[in-house]
């Protein structure tokens, strides 16, 4: 566009603006109606055309082309009608707009809304449909969620009446107390009397009150401690002690003087080491019977005197004969080592003597028998008593050795060196010895030639020794060598007795006569001696009670690590008997567990198992004999008893079939049972008997017409297992004479014969339709219960599946649930079906924190034993009672205090609270105490114990805890097993050691020294202030042995050498085993989209782990990710639609997940898939009729969803997916799926397994085929599903499920605008938070990070101590600073007690993803990825509030696209202001294109770029004092000619109606020409615009694009720094604002259209963000030039040139409208701003042009862009006011008007 064209455009637009503002509104109305209608029609046609193009299947047109076509069409339509639209809109007044025809503007609003239209058609409006579907209607749900229902809330805050079926007083107990009141407790006594006096006594019997039993009724059952039937009795000293095996009454408190110590704990007489009874009341001191050298009876009093005559002084004469001398008074030799050496061999000798002065010349003199000498110099000097010399090669003889010091003559203090002729050794034996722990010694014989030892055996210098070398000696900390001393037994033999080693070994043996030099050539050729471990022997093999496995025992440990299968252990015949798929694993080295596999012939009692030859050796032995032999298999101690269980429909319709299933029968022993059916009836059984004769399966299906109508038939099934045990069950079926739906109630998640009160479960009414007489139709359900106090779940009381909430049933009763079912079209044909549930009270759970055994020092202070974690799973409203008992186990006595001043008193004194506390000095050293906690509620009791060993001093105190598993310390095979150890210590630690113990007692073995079995290397974390350390081990999943108990001991040692231990015991559950899984009736193939059957048989679990549940999954990719294809159910058989084969395969792999109460196992099978060649419209209709609609009719929406997804997937094959982020209208198939998902959520209480299935189904939805509204609903559904995991205690979402949800969240998020769609983005971020909350539950401290990623965002979760920096998944890193490191340490106080470390969660958004920024400036200047950081409690996951740190957090970010001339500023996202902020954040730029963001708080961080500052003085002529030249008391809209090349139009505030009319008359004749010019100019080149619309009118705001500025000067500093004239380079159609920030909003809730404001800068605390940001939020593009001036803010007495802008929208004459309140802004003086605004009409497609409006409120800050307010009609005049801020009245004074 040329300069002239732009000038014309400006003049014409402003002229038209003035003209139409004073023209007849009627004319405007007509023009508006016509032009808007045309515009909408064209826009609609364009949209339809572009949509058709984008959905076209033509491969030649790309998606980008489609997008361009859409844009071009829209632009073209807009241009064609620009002039008429602009004219019409600008002429409309506010009042006229409201009364105009809304149809066209409504459609335009729909077209241009970038948010979600509410039900009233308002973009991002808050209108809602009521429950009756009326927009902003008055219909409401009652408390039972029934629209306009009659249910009400009673005084007990319970929903009653209406569909609830509850009485008006529901929720009130029998004593008239509401159960819902805070702190509710039962007020009747144990006899049931309200406010009665009966109570449960120590014997757990209700006595007193109205029971008729005296309170002391059980007095005779109490022992001396007051424990019912405790068995303790009084000993001979009258003290209460536990019973002994021989019932002896002897007292440990009777001392050696036959005196009873009373009270216990006082000193008692005892026998000292000399056997004398001393102390106590004997009057003898402890040394009686002893002398200085020992006991009088053993040694004399002089036997221990030193040379100084002092007992036990140790003083001896030195080599110079001086008592206790230093050896410096003479020079001499004391002894020589070795002193017996072989002849003709030079050897280094160690000389020990005296007078070896350091620095002297020392030498050794060897004197021969003939008196001649040989002298050698000293080799090495050690000290004044020890030197070494090398001997000459000497012949066999004795030699005198003396020492020369300097020139001194040798003294006569000498030593003797004996030299012998070498001897050849012929044998050392025995060469092989069998390892035998029962034998202490091994005798070894060294043999030489006859007479070889004759000359030396009598020599005083000969020392028969055997030098043995081998790694076995490392066990004894002896290095690799040890010397054994022996004896000569003859002239040719020496004998040695050596210890039996602890394990097998091979050693080298070197015979010697001096302990250093081998005889003969044995130094180079030592003898080899082996100690070989005996082979393990089979002891027994016995079936487990459940028949699924066997236990094989050996007499010693087996080296089992090399075994990978049973066939490695047993021979082929035995392996075949164990079956295909059998598994063998060692519980401990001596115990083999076998899980029997599958085969036509399997092992039975009496069969023989034989070991494989050469396979089995001894555990951890270097060398071992090989085991052999066999063992006969014994039957179980308690043969498995089968239990026949029958299920079916007790009433079938007239045309129905008899279907009874016995597949839930148990006790099969993991192999097929035999089944025998029979029937009894008063009706005819001929046809039934005939049909039953051929049935040998557990399922019975027969034609219902075989039964006489309305006649009961009693069917029976007898099941027999392979042990020969049998059981029979019965089931009555009756055929109705009329056509009724068939109903069967199935329980899921509970054993109805023993349902714990704390269990939640589902009851499902399975409905079967028959096309012949009961065709499918909408079905109605209504549940009831025979106990009026049972609160049925109101959400599901009228649904197919009734959810029974945990703790909603009374204990120890039989509760019958009944469902009434009828088709809505046949409400008179009601079918009832019932199920009875027997409830049992759940046992209380007593828990003592810490290990089961620990060591405590008496000097450690107060000891607390914490039982506060104990709980009642049933949550019965009665206070728990606690009682503690103590037994001193070492002496089998009560616990008597040994603390000074408390001696003999029983402790602990107070033992009725959850936490037991006492001083450790009460305990006696070297004694073990057993403390037992008993918790009670009514007749229920539970106990827990801890064993404490008391020692002297204050060694480290260890508390070890299992950090996973249930309350009984049982874990599953799939669990990683973290074990924590807290160590309290007064001296720094040196080590913490882990080991399994008591493996010989049947406990499992785990090698903690093998780091490959641990998830991370254990580290010791010590709190910064010392005194407490934390460490843990994490055992990897799948390494522990099923069915095995482990006892782990932790030993902590400090620098003083003090150590203590703590022990914890846990067990690994056996889990589910032995399932047979078949698909498609076992034929190995199926045709896609047809019904197939899934069947599981012979599954076995631990006895306490039933019932079982079943769910089928399908492997969907090569990474073995799965998707659920059936709901989780209690039936071992299910049916479903066969899915198509996975891509690239002609088969599918199915996974059956079978779960007991505690864990799940998976079983797989592979099935071929036949492709359905065609799937016609008729096939689709048929599929819907048979596979979808019946499920929907009966309320099985989850099943219908699965099948609908299959249909959509099949029928959309080959369809091109759109690449747009969302559609204008949701496709029909996606709408169907969304509706089903919403129905699933709204009609059921989702279990975790249902949620998994829902996630898998949701993953298949195509969000780009949904409208924004539907995507919003989809996000709500994802939120609800995520909530299931995040709100369920202990629930951990699988990573693949989390990735699925994150992917769908990001699919939606990437197409959202933070301005228009902030609420949806909130849901996206909330969904991510819930995913992380659930995922991190499965993390262990120090167990590494978990990452899930999708479309530009990666979530990372980990738990650890904050002693190192943490990395995000995208490469950023975070150092948490000393404040946080010192707060959240190895041990800190959290909600659950003591926590270690924290949970660290990070969200990393790459450069392509921005879910926060609401302005183009922020989006364009963001220079780094965005990183969100959160810390939370590692136990509860509650977010930790991190603010005001003195030691900041450092977030290290990488600049994505470094460029010169830029500076980078770190910012955080302020959720309060919904803006990026720098508060509390400091930036450090590094040379490696990274920045460090130092923050005093946690948040979401990023770095933003801006031009680098330079220093330039203010320009000449800058305005520096009040006002703007030429303006006196008035304000002028000004375009500065010095800063623009464009023409400038000045609008004087003195303009009046007459002048405007005159101008209008002058241009009236040119109106048509002007309109044509505008159209032509706009078609030539049109700056992008954005429409701001509502149902009344619409307005376009466009900024004239200025020329680029010279980019030389820095922007002004924020908040009051010096102002410079700052030219800023401005991108086209965008101008940054250089004015003051402000923090608080001002009154007014209606946005202004535009304002032109000279001499205005923003007053702090009076504007939201900045004035420019506000204008931009209204869709106005601004260019401001702040000029240098004083930074003066107004106050009381400010001059009149302090101006106030009051922005409002009003009528055409400029008068204020009371219906549209103004928004006021206080403005400081002395800052000039030039602002240009141009108003025109037209559509805008460029989102970068402007942003929609924000709503401002005087009462609260808008924390995030929410629903945009109604935009105003034409731009009107802004009234300028001056305000004198005053705390007194805050009045506003008008100064002038424009």
Image (cartoon, helix red, strand yellow):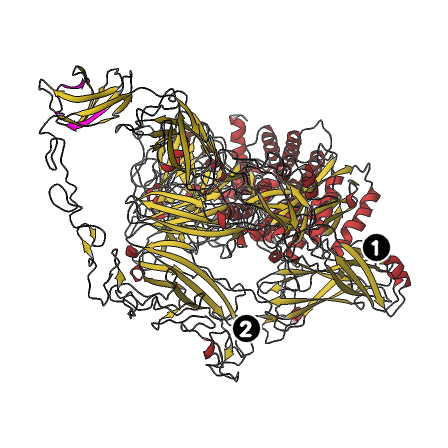
The image position of residue 865, as x and y in percent, is 38, 60
Between 194 and 491, which is closer to the camera in this rendering? 491
Q: How crowded is mark 2: few (under 14 residues within 10 Å), some or many (20 or more)?
A: some
Residue receiving disc 2: 156
The image shows residue 1667, relative to residue 1422, as above or below, that is below
**Image location of residue 669, percent across then percent down:** 69, 52
Q: Distance between the residues labelled 1 and 2?
A: 56 Å
**Is the residue under label 2 in contact with that under label 1 (CB below 8 Å)?**
no
Residue 266 visible here: yes
Q: Residue 621 in magenta? A: no
Q: In this view, does 664 lie above or below 1600?
A: below
Of residues 59 and 490, the one nearer the viewer is: 490
In the rendered structure, does residue 361 fall within the stretch colored magenta?
yes
Q: Which mark is residue 695?
A: 1
- SS state under label 1: loop
Screen quadrant of the N terminus: top right
Residue 711 occupies quadrant: bottom right
Q: Is residue 1434 left or right of residue 1288?
A: left
Return the x and y of residue 1757 as percentages of the image width and height. Answer: 44, 52
Question: What is the magenta range?
Answer: 350-368
- The one nearer the camera, 1478 or 1525, is 1478
Q: Residue at x 15, y 22 (%)?
A: 403
Residue 1747, position in %: x, y? 51, 41
Q: What element carries label 2?
A: loop
Residue 237 as seen in the image, left or right of residue 326: right
Q: Earlier in the sequence, mark 1 or mark 2?
A: 2
Q: In the rendering, which numbered label is found on residue 1193?
A: none
């Amino acid at each position: 566009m040329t300069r002239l064209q732009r000038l014309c455009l400006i003049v014409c637009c402003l002229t038209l603006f003035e003209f139409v503002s004073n023209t007849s509104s009627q004319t405007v109305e007509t023009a508006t109606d016509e032009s808007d209608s045309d515009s909408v029609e064209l826009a609609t046609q364009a949209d339809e055309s572009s949509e058709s193009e984008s959905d076209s299947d033509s491969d030649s047109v790309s998606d980008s082309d489609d997008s361009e076509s859409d844009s071009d069409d829209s632009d073209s339509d807009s241009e064609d009608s620009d002039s008429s639209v602009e004219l019409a809109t600008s002429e409309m007044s506010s009042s006229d707009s409201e009364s105009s025809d809304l149809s066209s503007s409504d459609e335009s609003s729909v077209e241009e809304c970038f948010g979600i239209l509410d039900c009233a058609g308002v973009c991002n409006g808050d209108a809602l449909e009521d429950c009756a579907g009326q927009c902003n209607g008055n219909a409401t749900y009652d408390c039972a969620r029934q629209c306009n229902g009659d249910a009400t809330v009673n005084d007990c805050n319970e929903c009653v009446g209406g569909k609830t079926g509850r009485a008006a007083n529901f929720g009130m107990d029998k004593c008239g107390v509401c159960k819902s009141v805070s702190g509710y407790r039962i007020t009747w006594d144990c006899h049931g009397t309200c406010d009665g006096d009966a109570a449960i006594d120590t014997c757990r019997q209700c006595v007193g009150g109205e029971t008729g039993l005296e309170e002391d009724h059980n007095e005779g059952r109490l022992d001396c401690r007051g424990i019912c039937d405790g068995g303790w009795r009084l000993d001979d000293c009258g003290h209460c002690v536990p019973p002994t095996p021989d019932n002896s009454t002897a007292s440990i408190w009777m001392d050696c003087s036959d005196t009873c110590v009373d009270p216990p704990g006082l000193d008692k007489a005892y026998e000292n080491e000399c056997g004398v009874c001393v102390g106590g009341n004997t009057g003898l001191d402890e040394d009686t019977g002893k002398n200085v050298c020992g006991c009088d009876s053993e040694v004399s009093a002089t036997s221990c005197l030193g040379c100084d005559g002092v007992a036990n002084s140790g003083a001896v004469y030195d080599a110079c004969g001086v008592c206790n001398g230093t050896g410096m008074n003479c020079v001499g030799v004391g002894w020589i080592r070795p002193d017996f050496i072989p002849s003709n061999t030079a050897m280094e000798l160690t000389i020990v003597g005296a007078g070896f002065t350091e620095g002297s010349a020392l030498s050794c003199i060897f004197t021969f028998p003939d008196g001649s000498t040989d002298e050698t110099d000293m080799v090495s000097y050690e000290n004044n008593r020890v030197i070494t010399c090398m001997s000459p090669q000497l012949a066999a003889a004795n030699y005198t050795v003396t020492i020369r010091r300097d020139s001194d003559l040798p003294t006569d203090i000498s030593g003797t060196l004996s030299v012998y002729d070498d001897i050849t050794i012929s044998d050392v034996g025995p060469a092989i010895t069998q390892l035998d722990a029962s034998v202490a010694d091994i005798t070894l014989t060294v043999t030489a030639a006859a007479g070889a030892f004759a000359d030396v055996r009598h020599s005083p210098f000969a020392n028969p020794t055997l030098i043995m070398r081998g790694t076995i000696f490392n066990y004894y900390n002896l290095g690799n060598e040890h010397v054994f001393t022996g004896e000569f037994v003859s002239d040719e033999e020496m004998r040695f007795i050596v210890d039996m080693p602890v394990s097998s070994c091979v050693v080298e043996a070197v015979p010697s006569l001096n302990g250093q030099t081998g005889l003969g050539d044995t130094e180079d050729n030592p003898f080899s001696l082996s100690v070989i471990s005996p082979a393990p022997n089979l002891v027994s093999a016995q079936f487990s009670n459940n028949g699924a496995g066997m236990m094989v025992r050996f007499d010693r440990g087996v080296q089992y690590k090399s075994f990978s299968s049973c066939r490695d252990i047993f021979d082929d015949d035995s392996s075949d008997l164990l079956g295909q798929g059998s598994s063998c694993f060692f519980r401990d080295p001596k115990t083999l567990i076998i899980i029997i596999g599958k085969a036509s012939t399997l092992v039975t009692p009496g069969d023989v198992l034989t070991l494989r030859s050469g396979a089995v050796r001894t555990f951890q032995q270097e060398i071992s004999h090989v085991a052999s032999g066999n063992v006969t298999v014994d039957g179980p101690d308690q043969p498995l008893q089968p239990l026949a269980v029958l299920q079916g429909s007790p009433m079938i319709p007239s045309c129905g079939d008899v279907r009874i299933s016995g597949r839930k029968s148990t006790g099969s022993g993991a192999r097929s049972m035999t089944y025998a059916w029979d029937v009894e009836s008063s009706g005819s059984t001929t046809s039934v008997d005939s049909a039953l004769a051929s049935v040998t399966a557990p399922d019975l299906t027969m034609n219902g017409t075989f039964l006489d109508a309305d006649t009961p038939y009693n069917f029976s099934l007898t099941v027999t297992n392979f042990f020969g045990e049998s059981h029979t069950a019965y089931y009555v079926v009756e055929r109705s004479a009329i056509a009724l739906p068939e109903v069967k109630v199935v329980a899921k998640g509970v054993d109805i014969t023993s349902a714990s009160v704390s269990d939640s479960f589902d009851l499902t009414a399975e409905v079967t339709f028959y096309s012949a007489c009961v065709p499918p139709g909408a079905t109605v359900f209504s549940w009831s219960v025979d106990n009026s106090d049972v609160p049925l779940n109101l959400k599901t009381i009228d649904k197919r599946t009734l959810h029974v909430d945990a703790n909603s049933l009374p204990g120890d009763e039989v509760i019958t649930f009944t469902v009434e079912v009828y088709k809505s079209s046949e409400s008179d044909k009601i079918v009832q079906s019932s199920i009875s549930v027997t409830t049992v009270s759940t046992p209380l759970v007593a828990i003592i924190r810490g290990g089961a055994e620990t060591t405590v020092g008496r000097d450690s202070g107060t000891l607390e034993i914490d039982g506060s974690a104990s709980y009642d799973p049933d949550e019965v409203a009665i206070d728990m009672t606690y009682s503690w008992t103590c037994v001193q186990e070492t002496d089998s006595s009560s616990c008597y205090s040994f603390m000074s001043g408390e001696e003999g008193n029983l402790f602990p004194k107070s033992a009725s609270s959850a936490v037991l506390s006492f001083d450790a000095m009460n305990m006696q050293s070297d004694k073990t105490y057993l403390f037992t906690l008993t918790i009670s509620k009514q007749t229920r009791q539970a106990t827990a114990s801890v064993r404490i060993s008391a020692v002297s001093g204050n060694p480290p105190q260890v508390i070890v805890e299992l950090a996973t598993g249930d309350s009984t310390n049982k874990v599953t095979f799939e669990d990683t097993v973290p074990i924590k150890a807290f160590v309290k210590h007064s001296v720094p630690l040196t080590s913490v050691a882990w080991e399994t113990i008591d493996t010989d007692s049947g406990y499992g073995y785990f090698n903690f020294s093998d780091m490959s079995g641990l998830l991370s290397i254990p580290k010791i974390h010590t709190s910064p202030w010392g005194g407490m350390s934390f460490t843990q081990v994490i055992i990897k999943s799948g390494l522990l042995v099923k069915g095995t108990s482990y006892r782990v001991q932790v030993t902590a040692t400090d620098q003083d050498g003090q150590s203590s231990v703590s022990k914890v015991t846990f067990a690994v559950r056996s889990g589910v085993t032995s399932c047979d899984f078949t698909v498609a009736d076992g034929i190995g193939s199926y045709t896609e989209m047809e019904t197939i059957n899934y069947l599981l048989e012979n599954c076995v679990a631990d006895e306490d782990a039933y019932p079982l549940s079943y769910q089928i999954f399908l492997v969907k990719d090569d990474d073995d990710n799965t998707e659920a294809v059936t709901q989780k159910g209690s039936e071992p058989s299910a049916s479903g639609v066969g899915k198509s084969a996975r891509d690239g395969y002609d088969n599918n792999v199915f996974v059956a997940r079978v779960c007991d109460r505690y864990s799940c196992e998976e079983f797989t099978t592979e099935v071929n898939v036949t492709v359905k060649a065609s799937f016609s419209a008729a096939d689709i209709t048929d599929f819907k009729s048979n596979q979808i609609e019946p499920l929907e009719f009966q309320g099985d929406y989850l099943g219908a969803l699965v099948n609908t997804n299959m249909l959509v997937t099949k029928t959309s094959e080959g369809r091109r997916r759109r690449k747009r982020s969302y559609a204008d209208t949701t496709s029909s198939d996606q709408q169907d799926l969304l509706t089903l998902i919403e129905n699933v959520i709204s009609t059921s209480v989702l279990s975790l397994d249902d949620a998994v299935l829902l996630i898998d189904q949701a993953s298949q939805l195509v969000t780009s085929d949904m409208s924004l509204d539907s995507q919003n609903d989809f996000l709500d559904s994802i939120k609800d599903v995520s909530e299931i995991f995040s709100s369920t205690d202990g629930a951990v979402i699988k990573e693949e499920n989390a990735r699925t949800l994150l992917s769908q969240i990001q699919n939606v998020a990437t197409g959202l605008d933070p301005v228009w769609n902030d609420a949806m983005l909130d849901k996206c971020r909330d969904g991510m938070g819930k995913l992380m909350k659930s995922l991190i539950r499965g993390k262990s401290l120090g167990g590494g990070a978990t990452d899930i990623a999708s479309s530009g965002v990666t979530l990372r979760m980990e738990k650890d101590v904050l002693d190192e920096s943490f990395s995000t998944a995208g490469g950023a890193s975070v150092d948490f600073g000393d404040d946080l490191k010192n707060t959240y340490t190895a041990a800190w106080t959290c909600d659950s007690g003591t926590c270690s470390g924290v949970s660290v969660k990070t969200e990393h958004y790459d450069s392509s993803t921005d879910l926060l920024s609401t302005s183009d400036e922020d989006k364009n200047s963001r220079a780094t990825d965005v990183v969100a950081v959160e810390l939370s409690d590692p136990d509860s996951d509650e977010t930790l509030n991190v603010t005001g740190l003195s030691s900041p957090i450092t977030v290290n970010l990488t600049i994505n696209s470094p460029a010169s001339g830029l500076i980078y500023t770190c910012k955080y996202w302020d959720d309060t202001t919904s803006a990026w902020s720098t508060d509390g954040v400091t930036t450090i730029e590094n040379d490696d294109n990274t920045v460090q963001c130092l923050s005093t708080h946690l948040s979401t961080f990023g770095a933003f770029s801006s031009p680098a500052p330079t220093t330039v003085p203010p320009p000449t002529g800058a305005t520096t004092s009040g006002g703007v030249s030429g303006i006196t008391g008035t304000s002028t809209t000004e375009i500065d000619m010095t800063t623009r090349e464009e023409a400038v139009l000045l609008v004087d505030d003195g303009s009046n109606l007459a002048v405007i009319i005159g101008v209008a008359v002058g241009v009236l004749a040119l109106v048509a020409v002007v309109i044509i010019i505008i159209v032509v100019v706009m078609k030539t080149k049109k700056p992008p615009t954005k429409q701001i619309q509502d149902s009344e009118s619409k307005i376009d705001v466009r900024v004239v694009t200025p020329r680029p500025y010279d980019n030389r000067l820095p922007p002004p500093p924020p908040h009051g720094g010096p102002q410079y004239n700052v030219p800023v380079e401005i991108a086209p159609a965008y101008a940054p604002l250089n004015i003051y920030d402000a923090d608080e909003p001002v009154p007014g809730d209606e946005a202004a259209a535009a304002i032109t404001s000279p001499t205005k800068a923003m007053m702090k605390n009076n504007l939201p963000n900045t004035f420019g940001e506000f204008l931009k939020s209204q869709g106005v593009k601004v260019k401001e030039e702040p000029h240098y001036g004083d930074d003066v803010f107004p106050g009381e007495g400010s001059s009149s040139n302090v101006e106030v802008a009051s922005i409002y929208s009003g009528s055409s004459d400029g008068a204020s409208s009371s219906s549209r309140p103004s928004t006021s802004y206080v403005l400081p003086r002395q800052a000039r701003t030039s602002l240009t605004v141009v108003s025109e009409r037209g559509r805008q497609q460029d989102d970068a042009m402007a942003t929609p409006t924000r709503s401002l409120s005087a009462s609260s800050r808008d924390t995030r862009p929410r629903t945009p307010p109604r935009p105003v009609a034409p731009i009107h005049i802004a009234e300028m006011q001056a305000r004198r801020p005053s705390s007194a009245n805050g009045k506003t004074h008008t100064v002038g008007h424009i």
